[in-house]
Amino acid sequence: MKPIIAINFVLYLFFSCFTAFPQTSKQPFQLEDLRKLVNISDPAISPDGNRIAFIVSKPDWEKDKAVQNIDLINSDGSSLRTITYKRKGISNLNWSPDGNSLGFVAKDSETKKPQIFIMPMNGGDPVCITDSKTGIKEFTWSPDGKTIAYAAQDTVPNPKEIEHHEDAFKVNDNNFLVRAELQPWHLWIVPSSGGKAKQLIKGKQSLCTDQETISPLVWSKDGSSILFQLFPDVWEGNGWHCVIGKVDTNGGGIDTVIKEQGSGSPSFAPETNMLAFMRPRNGDQNNGNAVYIRIGNKIVDATAELARNINSYVWMPDGKSLLLTGEKGTRSVILSQPVNGKASVLNFGEVNCSSKPSVSKNGTIAFIGNTASHPAELYVLDKEGKAPVRLTDLNSFVDSLDLSKSEGITWNGPDGFKEDGVLNYPVNYVAGKNYPLVMVIHGGPEGASTVEFSSLIQLLAAKGFFVFQPNYRGSTNLGDKYQHAIFRNTGKGPGEDVMAGLNKVEKLVKVDTSRIGISGWSYGGYMTSWLNGYYPDKWKAAVEGAALNDWVMDYTISYYQTGDLYFFGGSPWTKEYWNIWRDQSPIVYARNVKAPTLIMGDVGDSNVPLVNSYEMYHALKDNGVHVEFYAYPADTHFPGDIVRTTDVFRRWVNWMVKYLK
């Protein structure tokens, strides 16, 4: 739910909606094609800009696992090769300052924990330089390349007692699935050539939360200290109170560098001592993330004029500007933001940015991108203003398929908002013909439906459906005012936004209004539950995945805890806020539901606990609604493995086919 974990079910391509699309003999995207999709992540460009390392993940259907490798390619697109084999849990690609070595985290065969490996780029196997008993979360090189800082969790202080079942733990702000007292993550340093590691900080405060939220570690220019995001404890629900701390590499206490709560992702400008960091604008968690810069003793919001959410940022090598990523309308874009000046969107044509960019010392930019009709590939941009060049073709099979066409649409929503979404047409669409429609609502709610390639959308369009993906207040793509408008209005307002968008679609194309389905996962599941009960006569079928149905229960047992407070302003257990939490819970309207409803979720989901789905299942069943409920034995918010993902999509699509076709 709240972290932008939810699936971005989006596809986008401008075309005229009054023209029939040409019929082809190509096959549409099918469930079997999910097994072929290659995921590309973590682009890391070498300091000289000549080489780019990235992680390639391919699904293994038989073993139901993802096979990971690190690939390396020259920035001119030549010499693509795999440089690691049979490694598990690869992450954190990180070049040494001189570019002679590549560091990464992977599971070690001896300790069975994630450790830091250093690979010499002039030949030779990766060498494991750590032996952490709990595993490594994040690491970074010192400016001279001689030392590495990393975060690791403390060991359990009383293992013998726990083994003897003296293991009761004090409940505080943990989610209800926690089965032991969790230890904090702290800062360590180790020589980059290997050797004895040294722990720099201790105590209750933590560099990471139980949901693995962690920020980059940053060395000072002279290598004498390290900056980090510091949480009050290990619990994600209290993560909103994080600050930026600093510790000397020789030891000593933690100094607070940025005291404003919600701060993280610190980064020094390459040529100056300016420190950039991210924080919800003005400290309001209902606003988007802004990039602040500390210049001397003054802190300014460098992105104030944008007044919209920023997903990530990186300094350009001259230290005079930053690259920002975020959603703008129905596009995922990169913006150039001068330290003093107005931001501008880099023109990438149909290419959307789906990763944090990696920038070399000469200004060459590497990122993962996609288009409306092609999944993720590696792109390079040698200078701002030029078109990005695609370096890989790992998902080339998609180009031979008959894909759904799509367009971004806008409408005038309630409360004076200009709103948008993405409309996909059925494969082999014929103008003037009536088609059923499936609505797929994004999660978050701090997310957005953008132009990114989506397997689920293609599967639905292949079955002859219009697919509509509306954005709604709370979304991150239309500015802070729109994002903030979900405050104390989590159901009715977004629901009216969605219905206004559907009304626009029904005017644009011939929708069979007697055959409309609604669906979504996470907050998209919440919206599905809300609309299913609030407008019960509109829907012919519904699919809700990991749906938050009861705000009070979510606050009480999920990992958000104090995080949920920002939606309403106060606790659901106090008199002042008692009614608002309950009135905006979809379970209140469950007795109104008429549409056959499919419910899905993961048993071990601490994000939106499955108890929400059990509530809705029995409410619908006891009121005579045809409902089916499938639970996956996974400890995730959405099943991440290929077999379960395929099963989710199969049930989702088949449910709509059964009741809409």
Image: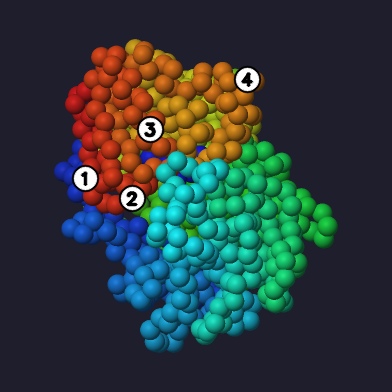
Height in image: 90 above or below 387? below
Q: Residue at x 33, y 61 (%)?
A: 57
**Label 1 element class:** helix
Query: Badge 4: few (under 14), some or many (20 or more) residues near its Cα, within 10 Å?
Result: few
The residue labelled by disc 2 is 640
**Label 4 element class:** loop
Q: Indicate which label's residue lies in the foreground, 1 or 2.
A: 2
Dot label at residue 622 = none
Residue type at numbered disc 3 = Val
The residue labelled by disc 4 is 575
Height in image: 508 above or below 270? above
Mark nearer the N terminus (2 vs 3): 3
- Whether pointer 1 and pointer 4 mark residues with C-beta atoms closer than 8 Å, the reply is no
Q: Residue at x 47, y 80 (%)?
A: 129
Residue 645: % across, % down: 28, 46
How far apart are the alpha carbons under marks 1 and 3? Answer: 29 Å
Q: Residue at x 29, y 64 (%)?
A: 67
Residue type at numbered disc 1 = Leu
- Whether pointer 2 and pointer 3 mark residues with C-beta atoms closer than 8 Å, the reply is no
Residue type at numbered disc 4 = Lys
Task: Residue at the far left: name it.
Answer: 25
Q: How many marks?
A: 4
The residue labelled by disc 1 is 31
Q: In the shown orientation, is residue 178 left or right of residue 340?
A: left
The residue labelled by disc 3 is 611
